[in-house]
Amino acid sequence: MSPRFVLFGPPHLTAIALTLTVPLALALLARHEHLGRHADRLARMGLAGLLVAGWLCWYSLAAWRHELRLDYGLPMNLCDWAEIALVVALLTRGQFAYELGYFWGLGGTLQGMLTPTLYYDFPDLQFIFFFIQHGGVIAALLYLTLGTRLRPTAASLPRVIGASFAYLGAAALLDWSFGLNYGFLRAKPLGQNLLGLMSPWPWYIPELVAAGMGFVLLYYLPFALLDWTRHRKAPSRVP
């Protein structure tokens, strides 16, 4: 039997390190003068394949362990939607799909990766497939940002916020219809996480919405500062 999961234990930290270093290495190859074009295509197809394979393996494991239930097996978590968006972005380099994957991945999947709700540690298959999925999401959005140079813009903010409210509406309708808890709209998740610091149900829901909008602004801030710095350094035109 696999050992109990240890938060920020060696396997957890190793998974986080690989999630950060692999896309950085791939981005360097994608920017290589001679290898760039072919390396970019291979990296994008490889990451898309990793996300799809991780998803299929996760569901296969859940079915094998008889854990594939209505409250667990539907692709209605924000991480699922981020993963779908990033697969599309990797295959097409589409701006809107990238924006959704970037903000949803950092806003939802990153939290899940840092404070995962896992029972068993490495080498349990659930641990491996969990970090392939969640780590793959973070690796994909980092690669698309650093390797293909896609980036969010100011116009991304209303699009992503609108799409996020659409997700909340879909999750709320499903939760209300079948008594589920997608989007954590009916109960807080177990374990150590951001929602544990918020008010009891249902008062944490508006706090969750406000935090989500705050994270959207936070994750756009580096690009806003970069644009502001470039604007300040740009030579002024003489009439």
Image: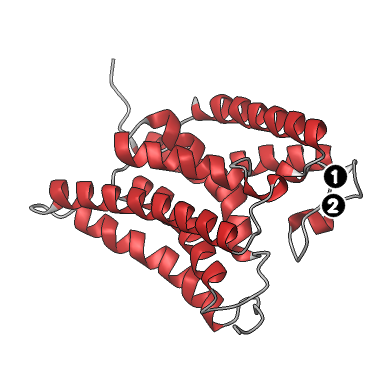
State the image coordinates of residue 208 (x, y, percent, origin top left).
Answer: 77, 43
For this rendering, which residue is in front, 186 or 139?
Answer: 186
Q: In this view, does 26 lie to the left or right of 201?
A: left
Residue that mark 2 sits on: 198
User: Which corner quadrant of the image does residue 194 belong to?
Assistant: bottom right
Note whether 171 is above or below 199 in the view shown.
above
State the image coordinates of residue 197 (x, y, percent, origin top left).
Answer: 83, 57
For this rendering, which residue is in front, 47 or 159?
Answer: 47
State the image coordinates of residue 100 (x, y, percent, origin top left).
Answer: 50, 36
Q: How crowded is mark 1: few (under 14 residues within 10 Å), some or many (20 or more)?
A: some
Q: Is residue 207 left or right of residue 12?
A: right
Note whether 30 is above or below 104 in the view shown.
below
Q: Which residue is drawn at 11% across and 54% down?
A: 35
Give the amino acid type for the residue marked by disc 1 in the picture: Tyr
State the image coordinates of residue 214 (x, y, percent, origin top left).
Answer: 68, 41
Q: Residue at x 68, y 50 (%)?
A: 69
Give the amino acid type for the residue marked by disc 2 in the picture: Met
Q: Provide the secondary structure element on which disc 1 rests.
A: helix
Q: Quadrant of the C terminus?
A: top left
Q: Residue at x 65, y 76 (%)?
A: 7
Residue that mark 1 sits on: 204
Q: How crowded is mark 2: few (under 14 residues within 10 Å), some or many (20 or more)?
A: some
